[in-house]
Image (cartoon, rainbow, N blue to C red):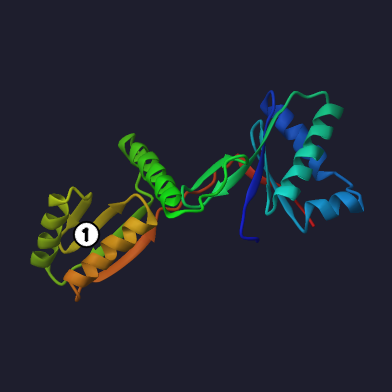
């Protein structure tokens, strides 16, 4: 994989069209020029009426979008097609016209947007993306850490000498774990991400080699 990730998003009229266009893409007999422009690999996935084509360069994304437009026209389908780019700081797909952050202030702005978005998701009932698990030396030590976290309005659950601390981002999880290790050096501290499993309808259609 390259240092960047691009995605062509295709929204079709209905789910069945997503199947039909996906089959056409899978059956493509690409010429040498198209293969060269697409690069070594383009991953295509389908989620109902939506198709997603993942690439590592803008040129590959442009070529993938061109192919989808040609196929949609041949099938007489109406499709909304847009190219997005992954912003790792904000952890979000954004329109390709939005540049990646280049300064500390721009990165801080995207980081704040990500934390605010994830905070709203948690308030709506979603789980935290990261958890810090602490096994304290004894119950008293665990209770002391729990009180300190609650005073700082940090979400924490304690069961005897075991604590689970919620974190919105990996950076927050790292900071919380470092503080716990510093103040309670004999505690066992580990960080664990909350894995997002793909929907059963989100399936791999094809790798172009």
Q: Which is more toward the observer, 3 or 29?
A: 3
Q: Which picture quadrant has residue 3?
A: bottom right
The quarter of the displayed image where residue 19 is located:
top right
The quarter of the displayed image where residue 143 is located: bottom left
Q: Residue at x 14, y 63 (%)?
A: 142
Could you tell whether 162 is left or right of 197 in the image?
left
Q: Residue at x 65, y 44 (%)?
A: 7
What is the x, y in percent for residue 178?
A: 27, 67
Q: Quadrant of the C terminus?
A: bottom right
Residue 123 locus on image (x, y percent): 30, 36
Front residue of 141/173: it is: 173
Is residue 94 in view from this perspective?
yes
Image coordinates for residue 27, horizontal then vertical, percent = 84, 44
Q: How many numbered marks, from 0 up?
A: 1
Residue receiving disc 1: 163
> How many residues crowd mark 1 within 10 Å: few (<14), some (14–19), many (20+)?
many
**Whole-percent x, y for residue 90 in the image:** 46, 47
Please identify the residue farthest to the right as the structure is shown.
31
At x 69%, y 23%, the residue is: 13
Direction from residue 195 to residue 43 in the image, left or right: right
Q: Is residue 206 visible?
A: no
Quick one: which residue is furthest to the bottom in this view?
Answer: 186
Give the side of residue 168 with respect to residue 42, left or right: left
Q: Secondary structure at mark 1?
A: strand
Quadrant occupied by the N terminus = bottom right
């Amino acid at each position: 994989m390259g240092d960047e990730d691009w995605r062509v998003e295709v929204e079709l009229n209905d789910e069945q069209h997503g199947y039909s266009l996906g089959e056409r893409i899978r059956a493509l007999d690409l010429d040498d020029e198209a293969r060269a422009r697409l690069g070594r690999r383009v991953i295509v996935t389908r989620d109902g009426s939506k198709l997603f084509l993942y690439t590592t360069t803008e040129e590959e994304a442009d070529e993938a979008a061109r192919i989808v437009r040609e196929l949609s026209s041949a099938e007489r389908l109406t499709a909304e097609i847009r190219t997005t780019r992954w912003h790792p700081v904000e952890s979000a797909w954004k329109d390709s016209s939005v540049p990646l952050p280049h300064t500390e202030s721009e990165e801080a702005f995207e980081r704040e947007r990500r934390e605010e978005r994830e905070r709203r998701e948690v308030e709506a009932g979603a789980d935290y993306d990261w958890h810090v698990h602490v096994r304290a030396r004894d119950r008293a030590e665990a209770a002391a850490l729990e009180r300190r976290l609650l005073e700082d309005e940090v979400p924490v659950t304690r069961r005897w000498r075991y604590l689970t601390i919620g974190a919105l981002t990996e950076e927050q999880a790292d900071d919380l774990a470092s503080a716990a290790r510093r103040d309670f050096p004999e505690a066992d501290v580990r960080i664990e991400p909350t894995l997002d499993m793909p929907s059963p309808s989100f399936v791999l259609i094809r790798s172009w080699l």
